[in-house]
Structure formats: structure tokens, C-alpha cells
């Protein structure tokens, strides 16, 4: 990267905490290098207390834009000048663009688009499909909204009755009133209801933390009869690359068992294009960072 830096270099940042685990700086800088772009990507340890100053820094320094991760995805909204229609529906932002570098900050949400593109890359469309979605946190909400925007017939959301449940009720209301998709919400602890919903769905999406640390080795489906030859199982978790749910789905003959690597790549690619106007070389970056872990 150093040989590419110049007085014209445009900066893109990541605002989150913790950030040390993030692959984003390496991935974006590698993509810039492959395309010969005069950009640099840096991660900054920013929580809610520092967020207002950080956003002012974007304006003052002419930073091209930022990726936003926890705990700032909702907290940043009051500091922005504009939201994309998707970000407004989701109620969260993971990408900020400094429009024309003039300090007008536009918030976007690319998580849901990343999920739909990951499915499409595996030959799976969502239009006119009945989809069961477990989890209504940040990722689940973004996915649910994008499924509605992309024409899913039904989105059946399951979530435990925790602090996300009330928000999930609002998501269902948005889907039912602002898209053509029919949406519903049920308690994830109602296992029989979950199984019945999956039986009527072509796609099952796990957007919960079940399957990653500290719940690694656990899964939401335990009955092999739930897994059908025409069922697509998509787990948004990318580490481990094969969760217990995906292993179970493969073992019992699911049509496809897809991990979260593609979603992570494509949501980043969407942000990359918003910041640079160019397509990220997704296949090259994915192979470089994940290699044989990509199914």
C-alpha cells in the first residue's frame, strides 16, 4: 500500500469497536491495489462516545466514506444528512458516503443486499419465494427488508422474545405496509411452528448467533425430516465456515447449504462500489482470504 499513497489518495474508514479482528482493511486495500485505485482504507476504534467527533472528522477531512459496524449502526443515523431508502427501512447504516466529498453524508445499508447477492451467486433467487428467517437482530432485519424489496412472496421471521422482538414487530409492519411481501413473526422457541414454516419454505436462513462462539456446535434444526432435497439452507455465519447447521443440512440432503462468506464479501463489495464507483474483484478477494473454505 505505501507505494500507492499520494497527495491525491482518498481515504475510506471503518468506525467500530472492537476493530482488531476486522478483515475489512486488508480486503479493501487489496482490492484497491488490484484495480490500481488511489485509495486507502483504515480502521478507527470508535464507539458511541466518539462517534459525533468521528463523523465531524469525515466532513472536515474530506474522507470519501466509511463502513460502520457495531456499536454504531443505529447511533450514527442522527449525525447523517440523508438515508438511502433501504437504510431508512432497516433503521441501520453500515456504509456512509461523503457525497462529492463536500460533507453531505448519506447512509446506506448493504447487509441485506449482500445476503441476496450471495444467494444469487449460488443460483438461488428470492423473488416469489416463501422464506423462513431465524433471527431479527441487525443482520436479520437487513435481510428481511431486502427480501421484501426484492419481491419475496412471504418472509416468516422467528426470534426469541428478547430485546429484538419489539423491533422485529416493527420490521414485519414495514414489510406488510411498504412492500408487496407478506410478513409474520413468531417465537423461535416454538420449534414445531418453526419446522412447519420451513416445510412450506424454499429457503431457510439462520441469522442468529447459534453456530458461532460461544454457541459453536449448536443448531436450530434437530429433526432430519425438516431437511428436504428442495430446501436451501443459508447460514449467515462465516466463522466457522461450516456450522453444525450446514453440516446437518448437507448430511441430510439439502439442495444447497450456503455459509456467510458470500454475504460478507458482497456486502463489502456493495460498499466498495458506493465509495469508488468500481466493482470489487470479489472472486479474487474471496479466494485470497478464504480459499478452500468457500463452498
Image: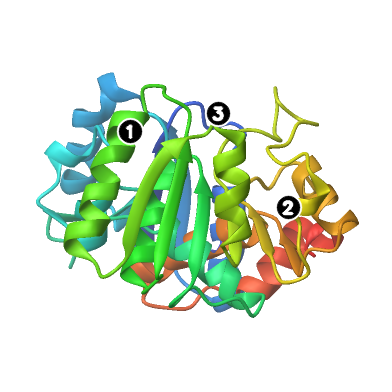
Alpha carbon separation for disc pair 2 and 3? 16 Å
Depth check: give the residue in front, 93 or 220.
Answer: 220
Crowding at dot 3, Cα within 10 Å, few <14 / some 14-19 / many 20+, comes out as few
Q: Is residue 77 left or right of residue 149?
A: left
Q: Which residue is mark 1?
A: 72
Measuring from the top left, give residue 59's x and y in whole percent. 17, 47
For the view shown, which residue lies furthest in the right direction?
251
Alpha carbon separation for disc pair 2 and 1? 37 Å
Depth check: give the residue in front, 59 or 105.
Answer: 105
Q: Is residue 98 visible?
A: no
Q: Which residue is mark 2?
A: 226
Q: Quadrant of the N terminus?
A: bottom right
Crowding at dot 1, Cα within 10 Å, few <14 / some 14-19 / many 20+, comes out as many
Q: Taking 65 as reference, is 269 above or below it?
A: below
Which quadrant would residue 70 be assigned to in this image? Answer: top left
Q: Taking 95 as reference, is 255 above or below it?
A: below
Q: Taking 151 as reference, is 26 above or below it?
A: above
Residue 189 marker:
3
Measuring from the top left, give residue 261's x and y in whole percent. 66, 56
Which quadrant would residue 143 be assigned to in this image? Answer: bottom left
Q: Secondary structure at mark 1?
A: loop
Q: How many marks?
A: 3
- Disc 3 or disc 1, which is closer to the eye? 3
Q: Secondary structure at mark 2?
A: helix
Amino acid at each position: 500500500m505505501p507505494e500507492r499513497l499520494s497527495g491525491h489518495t482518498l481515504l475510506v474508514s471503518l468506525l467500530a469497536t472492537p476493530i482488531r479482528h476486522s478483515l475489512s482493511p486488508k480486503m479493501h486495500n487489496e482490492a484497491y491495489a488490484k484495480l490500481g485505485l488511489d485509495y486507502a482504507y483504515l480502521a478507527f476504534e470508535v464507539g458511541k462516545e466518539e462517534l459525533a467527533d468521528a463523523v465531524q472528522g469525515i466532513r472536515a477531512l474530506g474522507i470519501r466514506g466509511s463502513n460502520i459496524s457495531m456499536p454504531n449502526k443505529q447511533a450514527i443515523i442522527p449525525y447523517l444528512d440523508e438515508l438511502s431508502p433501504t437504510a431508512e427501512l432497516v433503521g441501520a447504516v453500515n456504509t456512509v458516503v461523503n457525497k462529492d466529498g463536500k460533507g453531505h453524508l448519506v447512509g446506506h445499508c448493504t447487509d441485506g443486499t449482500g445476503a441476496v447477492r450471495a444467494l444469487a451467486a449460488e443460483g438461488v433467487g428470492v423473488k416469489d419465494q416463501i422464506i423462513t428467517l431465524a433471527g431479527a437482530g441487525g443482520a436479520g432485519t437487513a435481510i428481511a427488508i431486502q427480501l421484501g424489496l426484492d419481491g419475496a412472496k412471504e418472509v416468516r421471521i422467528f426470534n426469541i422474545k428478547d430485546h429484538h422482538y419489539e423491533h422485529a414487530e416493527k420490521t414485519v409492519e414495514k414489510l406488510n405496509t411498504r412492500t408487496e411481501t407478506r410478513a409474520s413473526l413468531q417465537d423461535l422457541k416454538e420449534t414445531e411452528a418453526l419446522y412447519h414454516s420451513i416445510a412450506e419454505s424454499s429457503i431457510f436462513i439462520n441469522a442468529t448467533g447459534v453456530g458461532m462462539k460461544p454457541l459453536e456446535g449448536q443448531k436450530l434444526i434437530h429433526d432430519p425430516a425438516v431437511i428436504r432435497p428442495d430446501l436451501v439452507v443459508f447460514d449467515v455465519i462465516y466463522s466457522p465456515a461450516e456450522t453444525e447447521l450446514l453440516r446437518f443440512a448437507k448430511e441430510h440432503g439439502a439442495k444447497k447449504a450456503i455459509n456467510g462468506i458470500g454475504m460478507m464479501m458482497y456486502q463489502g463489495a456493495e460498499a466498495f462500489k458506493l465509495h469508488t464507483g468500481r466493482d470489487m474483484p470479489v472472486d479474487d478477494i474471496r479466494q485470497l482470504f478464504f480459499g478452500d473454505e468457500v463452498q
